[in-house]
Amino acid sequence: MLSQDISLPCRLILQAAVAANDDNFKCHSWFGIILNEVGDLEGSKKKISYLYIVKEHWVQAAELNPKDATSQHLLGRWCYGIVTISSVMYWAARALFGKLPDTSWEEACVRACVRA
């Protein structure tokens, strides 16, 4: 895990990079990675709120470059993280957002193993 001193400035830099280069798959991949790290630092409530944004950027990266194994792997790891979430996080997400993002074991395996 990155420190807050590194993660937060990186988030701002990558947010600007995505805004300036919306068609660059690496900008989307790295923004999702950093936002995921920032969520770890900011606590469960923020991390859960970032789940949708992280997936959105990783999906965009995979769509911009379908042959990029890293983007596919990141999406597979994201799906795996959702389907294996702890009951505490599950109920916290339900309380905050009504539900977790949709995914499945099949999507996790296909993204992480087959497409990557």
Image: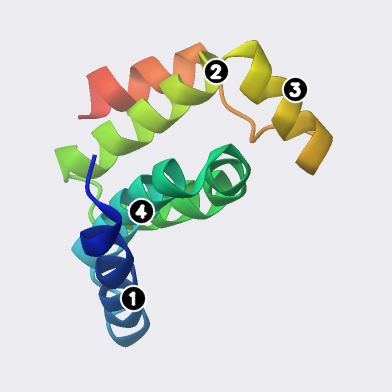
Amino acid carrying label 2: it is: Ile
Give the number of the disc on residue 85: 2
The residue beneath circle 1 is 12
The answer to whether the residues at label 2 and label 3 have Cβ atoms under 8 Å apart is: no
Give the residue type at disc 4.
Gly
Quarter of the image with the N terminus is top left
Q: Which residue is mark 4?
A: 32
For disc 3, the marked residue is: 91
Of residues 76 and 63, the one nearer the viewer is 76
**Residue 85, horizontal then vertical, whole percent:** 55, 18
- Dot placed on the residue nearer the N-terminal end, 2 or 3: 2
Between 57 and 106, which is closer to the camera in this rendering? 57
User: Disc 2, disc 1: CB below 8 Å?
Assistant: no
- In the figure, 49 relative to 76: above or below? below
Say whether disc 2 or disc 4 marks the residue closer to the N-terminus.
4
The residue carrying pointer 1 sits among few (fewer than 14), some (14 to 19) or many (20 or more) residues within 10 Å by Cα, namely few
Q: CA distance from mark 2 to mark 4?
A: 19 Å
Foreground of the two, 86 or 110: 86
SS under mark 3: helix
Q: How far is the residue under mark 1 from the one under mark 4?
A: 12 Å
Instruction: Tell me what residue is drawn at x 30 percent, y 56 percent.
Output: 4
Counting residues from the start of the chain, the first of labels 2 and 1 encountered is 1
Using the numbered discs, state the Cα–Cα distance from disc 2 to disc 3 in whole angstroms. Answer: 10 Å
